[in-house]
Image (tube, rainbow, N blue to C red):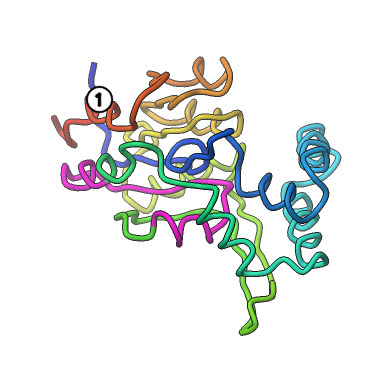
Amino acid sequence: MTANGIRTICFDVDGTLVEHPEGKTIWQLVNERYAGGYGLNRARMAAFRRGDITYAEWVALDVGDWATHGVGRREIEGIVRSELQPVPGAFETVEALAARGYTLALVSGTLNVTVELLLSRLPFSYCFTNRIWFDDDGRIRGWRATRYDGEGKARALERIAAAEGISCRECAFVGDHWNDVPALARAGFGVAYRPKDEAVRRAASAAIDEGPLSALLAWFPGPGR
């Protein structure tokens, strides 16, 4: 099986291109170390999924707490460098897909800091993430919540497709968690990479349950092939 007709491939980041030994995200790690622990992170995610708070409010609660606790560039970058790393095969896979002629994109609820430190040399034409800024002393100066997480990931595919002059059926998406389901379902070909639950697997066209990301290359020989 190959992903015929695909011209653009979009990736989630946390759990898909970047991993933590216990499956944690940058949000969880900063909250656990500096803000309110895992319970706080879990409670806010539950509040968002119930509709009690918006996604932007969730981001503001977390980043606002970080600023209150004195978390800045040094602390966040320290966690990224010490706790997170690219998944096996991430660099080789992305570079091979680019060489085969695919347009590549990132659509993720991660922080821009994660991308800048771990994935910046990879050839992504589009990058949609949450963003955070620091002042000259490294303190948090501001932030912007992405509009393209959860249901918004499907809208990101539509935006990218429009920019490329193609349809969403010509886009693939690679993800691992519940917030990737809308994009996996919207894409012409979805890949669940080490899926975290069955909803992710059901929404995808194919799955990689274990091993390096390079298994992805078997489905993507190149546009038009």
Q: Which residue is mark 1?
A: 219
Left or right: residue 52 compared with residue 216: right
Q: Is residue 13 above or below residue 79?
A: above
- Judged from this view, the residue extending furthest toward the bottom is 136
- The one nearer the camera, 186 or 111, is 111
Residue located at (51% from left, 15% from top):
202
Residue located at (39% from left, 36% from top):
168
- The one nearer the camera, 15 or 21, is 21
Residue located at (51% from left, 47% from top):
84
- Pick the quarter of the image with the N terminus: top left
Mark 1: which secondary structure? helix
Magenta stretch: give its range: 95-119
Q: For residue 115: magenta?
A: yes
Q: Quadrant of residue 24?
A: top right
The number of callouts visible is 1
Residue 152, percent from left and from top: 59, 43
Residue located at (77% from left, 49% from top):
58
Q: For residue 117: magenta?
A: yes
Residue 119, percent from left and from top: 39, 54
Q: Is residue 178 above or below residue 83?
A: above
- Pick the quarter of the image with the C terminus: top left
Disc 1 marks a residue whose amino acid type is Trp
- The one nearer the camera, 32 or 43, is 32
- The one nearer the camera, 224 or 63, is 63
- Judged from this view, the residue extending furthest toward the front is 82
For label 1, the crowd category at 10 Å Cα-Cα, with few meaning under 14, some 14 to 19 and many 20 or more, is some
Q: Quadrant of residue 39?
A: top right
Left or right: residue 70 compared with residue 116: right
Residue 80, percent from left and from top: 54, 55
